[in-house]
Amino acid sequence: MQPALVGTRSSNGESTLRVEALEVRLGGHPVLQGADLAVVPGEVVALLGPSGSGKTTLLRAVAGLVRPNGGRILLGTEVFFDGERGLFLPPERRSLGLVFQSYALWPHRTVYENVAYGLRLRRVPEKEVRERVLSLLDRLGLTGLERRYPGALSGGQQQRVSLARALAYDPKLLLLDEPLSNLDAKLRDQARVWLRETLKATGKAALFVTHDQVEAMAIADRIALLNEGRIEQVGTPEELYRNPRTFFVADFLGNPNVVDALVVALEGELVRLELAGFPLRARAMGSLTPGRLGKLVLRPEALRVAEPGEVNAVEGELTHSLYLGSHYEHWLRVGEARLRFLSPRPLGEKRLRLAVDPESVLAYPA
Amino acid sequence: MRLHRLSLPWPLILLVGVVGAMVLSPIGILAYQSLLTAPFFAPVKQLSLEAYRYLLQDPYFLEALRNSFVLGLGMVLIAVPLGSLFAFLVTKTDLPLARLFELLLLAPIFISAIILGIGFIVAFGPSGLIASWVEGFLGRVPWTVYTLPAIAVIAGLTHVPYVYLYVASTIQNVDASLEEAARVAGARPYQVALFVTFPLVRPALIYSGILMLLLGFELFGLPLVLGDAKGILVVTTYLYRLTAITGTTAYHLMAALSLAIVFIAFGLVLLQRYLVGRMEGRYVAIGARGYRTERLPLGGLRYFWALLLGIYLLVAVILPVLGVVFRSLVVSWGPGIDLREVLTLSHYAAVFQLPNLSRAVTNTLMVAALGGIAALVFYLFIAVGIQRGRSWGRVLDYLAGLPRAVPGLIMGLAFLWIFLFVKPLAPWRNTLLALILAYTVVWMPYGVRLLTAALLQVGREVEEAARIAGASAVRAFVDGTLPLLKGGLLTAWFLLFIQFVREYSTGVYLMTAGTEVIGAQIVALWGTGAVDVIAALATLQVVVVSLVFLLANRLGVRPQGL
């Protein structure tokens, strides 16, 4: 185990987390198959993906709670795991902060003892422990709760205590596993903003797992979208939403309409297709072949009721309209396809034309 | 439309009455007898406290009491730390051979303490197998098995599995993320154990600590074989020897002493309930997440711990049991004897030729198989009553737990007196029914707990669905719950079978010509010094229990601690 410590700890700027070609098999079943990721200091990165995509496993591998089968994990020059050289640094020597989904607060210890434990393990003098714990609790709005037991705290308070515990010993990297999933819906909206601000205020790099795309977009600087053990795309929320590199990314974000359409011709960046007899131009997102089918991704918010004479439009019959409070949601049948779109006001006609900008329609090979 | 009037639940009240009579009458007759000056069947007798006065002034009794306490304390100090350590190692770490250790650690629970005690004598006693081997090296044997501290150590070692079993099942329920959180914060595996795991299972540690004290007071087989010869008495052996000590059959003294033991045990049971009940809440957070957790790495020390566990098993289980088996196959043993000349099967021939010994073997199997089934059916009624009976159920629960405080030896004595006292029952005394009845009461707390747990797992929805569909209450139970209960019933039957086979103290006073069982027969033979035959009987018992245990293990039966 000793050679793993050859890396030196550098205090500023150098401690980028790098995950390279990481492979994890659990019970013979491949969970991660060559994941690559980098998190630079001060950056908040979300691991987003459907259940079973390996996001929690990736986080637990970085924490050292799962032993990978191949690849490398480094923080700065410190080697956490190196499959080729057979190096594995146990979690207690990685000095990371981890917020568990269940918070995992020790129920037999007070709030103070929970937060102080990491410092005491590091043999910090008791006076300094006290100062740091109390100032941290104060910063997280937990003043006065230090003698309580976790069982006597609300969900939101428990979550903040678990964040305080992870931050106490000044880790270079903070890991969070579904940090907001145990809060009820209303609290979660506020907690999103609070968590983003708190993470940015600490100036620490943070990696967090979520299955909630809104949460990922709201909190993260960058999102890594996982699919079946691989990282599908990494980028800012805007990049992922506007320029999804693969069909999976486009389909996963924003619950869009997905319809098949016939590729007619390629026009540089754009592609001409035919949807139920209507000509439609879209952005070509891969090698499309004229005469074959392509997958069209139409975001509901990009569709609008067409003005007379507007091109790049489809016509169909309105099948359902739902009142959702802030807006209406409608379903339009165009040939075989059904398109979902929104409007601020109810619609009168039964037959409608919907227009869309070519730049906001994405066409992928089927 | 006819509405059902709510009526008194007669079957339930009948059940409470039967259980109450079975549980309370032994204690009642002990109390009654302890207040008399002569046997309860004597024509001339008086009410008095003389028995108690005698006991409190008898130096032998006070010494036995002190010895029992020392024994219990030794068991707490040895079994609780070792048992919890082994539980942590086997369930939480990457200890090599953990599966094998898990299986072997349970063995002592299923082997009579008296057999293990004899095994210790054969293996480690003066001129024992191991002792002579060591003597060949060192020129002397640097230990003894016949002193009070030695008995306490042996009792402690043989009771490690009880603590192990209870603590391990609790540790398995600890939410793994609590331990992971400590590791991420920088705790090494031993720090995780000390900061998170053990504090979280503190109720289990306290429970098993008091269980050790309780079993220490009830211990009979070990002090009988190890301490009796040197005059080291504990409360149970004092009771057993009381007739010899006082020179007469002192019924009132036996009763007073038994009642004193029951009171001490009852106090410990209450203490256990109080302490564990007080701690509920802040302890043992049960994990909900299903993801796989890595076992804590012990590093290079894993072989050290495995070696320690291996040495423990060798000393406490393997050598004593092999010693007994070996002793049953030789004519005699000592330094300089050629093994080829002494090997024999004659002890087994003796067992099957002497009618009382061969009867002991067949009776044991009969009692375990048929008695086990009878007890199981009875326990099932009690468990259902506890689950469904509301306030009557709570009464049942308390009654069924009461025998916990009555050691088998005393329960056997009390039942003997009941058969003498209640004339209509007298014909039963010389049949196996007497034995089965006493066993059923002694093992009631254990068996009822097995079945309430099994019932709880099935849940009541199945039955409620059947009721809604139009089935009567009985029909709904038979069609809905019973089929789902099969696994739990099978487990309970296996465990009861094993406990009934290994039971030795309950039969001591109930043994008559015709109702011998292996365990009680060994106790009776011990006084005659017939070690050859005892070893053969003990080996037969170990073989039966091992076969049943392995079969049960194959079928996925998990053992349950006391």
Image (cartoon, coloured by chain):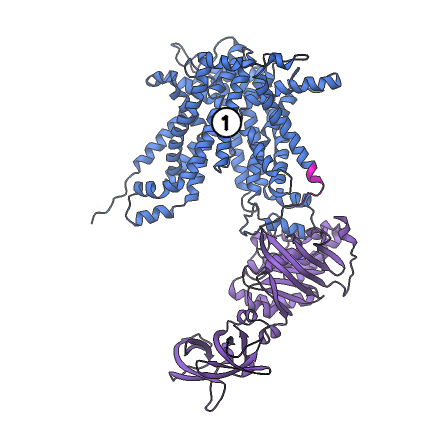
Chain colours: A purple, B blue
Look at the numbered disc 1 and give the secondary structure of its residue: helix
Q: Residue at x 48, y 29 (%)?
A: B548
Q: Which residue is mark 1?
A: B545
As drawn, B329 above or below B197: above
Q: Residue at x 50, y 28 (%)?
A: B547
Residue A259: x %, y % from top left: 47, 75
**Is B297 included in the stretch rendered in magenta?**
yes
Write down the chain letter for disc 1: B
Return the residue nearer the eye: B417 or A32: A32
As drawn, A223 above or below B366: below
The region drawn magenta spans: B295-303
**Can the viewer see residue B67?**
yes
Residue B474: x %, y % from top left: 31, 40
Residue B487: x %, y % from top left: 43, 39
Return the residue nearer the eye: B168 or A3: A3
Report how many numbered discs are placed on residues in the image.
1
As drawn, B529 above or below A265: above
Q: Residue B231 occupies which quadrant of the picture?
A: top right
Dot 1, how many residues are within 10 Å of its Cα: few (below 14), some (14-19), or many (20+)?
many
Residue B469: x %, y % from top left: 29, 49
Main secondary structure along the magenta-highlighted residues: loop
Q: Residue B206 occupies which quadrant of the picture?
A: top right
Q: Residue at x 63, y 20 (%)?
A: B123
